Amino acid sequence: IGPLAPLEHNVTFVSETPGVSYDKPNPMAVAHGAAIEVKAFKEGYHSKVMRQASVVHDMTLEFGLLDKKPEQIGAFVKFDNGTALDTRTNLMWMTKDFRNIEGRGLNGWDEARAWVAKMNRDTYGGYRDWRLPSLDEYQAIYDPSRPVMSAANKSMGYPAAFEDGGGKFYLSGVEANSDNVWGISFRTGGSRPWPKVNGNRNTTVRLVRYGQDQNAKTQ
């Protein structure tokens, strides 16, 4: 067995949990003649060699979650796949919103609906039944203590289990009329109709799904 050597270049890390990206671990390669065995170390994860190559700089690894105890934060159970389960309603939420993930605000309701389809194609968190919340579902998770900070560095009423850096005004899946959709400010908790064609840097969505619908989980 040859000496341990850092594996630093042209390494592809493929998640077993679609929609989840991980920081690049610190892999170490062990040379066995022409073959390469990779040992990658990241707390809480296991690794699997998907394809071996004769050079250290051409290796694909697959990282998947180990069975780790989820974190209980208030009424929410926060998982490592970017989701949190509200134990009061059995609704599972994305802990990041459109603003977190895309780095900008929504351009309108059409883009919000298209993003739902995209997250389901990508099986975010391992699921493919994400949807836009109703206004009532948004209102049920609003926290008036405003424990989380937005991308604009303002305190927001997202649950503490959710990530900092999100938007302010959330569009629902419920139409107010042919031109408007209901939305809610997670700064104030107030709701109002929002023009479907309007969007700005603070407009966003956070998707939700029913927590017990295991048929929608990818295998």
Image (spheres, helix red, strand yellow):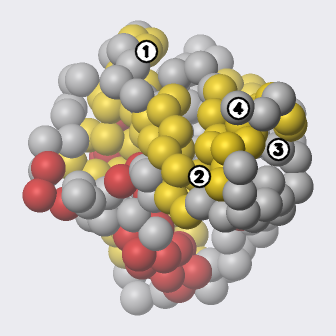
Mark nearer the viewer, 2 or 1: 2
Label 4 sits on a secondary structure element that is loop
Instruction: Left or right? Give the position of 112 relative to 100.
Output: left
C-alpha span from label 1 to label 4:
40 Å
| Tag shown at residue 61 | 2
Q: Residue at x 78, y 33 (%)?
A: 2
Given this view, does label 3 or label 4 mark the residue nearer the observer? 4
Q: Sort mark 2 into few (<14), some (14-19) or many (20+) by Cα contacts within 10 Å.
A: some
Point out the tag, 1 or 4, that comes first from the N-terminus: 4
Whether residue 22 appears in this view of the structure is no
Q: Quadrant of the C terminus?
A: bottom left
Mark 1 and 4 residues: CB-CB less than 8 Å, in contact?
A: no
> Badge 3 local density, few (<14 within 10 Å), some, or many (20+)?
some
Q: How far apart are marks 2 and 4 (CA)?
A: 20 Å
Q: How far apart are marks 2 and 3 (CA)?
A: 12 Å
Q: Label 4 belongs to which residue?
A: 1
Q: What element carries label 2?
A: strand
Q: Nearer the viewer, residue 159 or 85?
A: 85
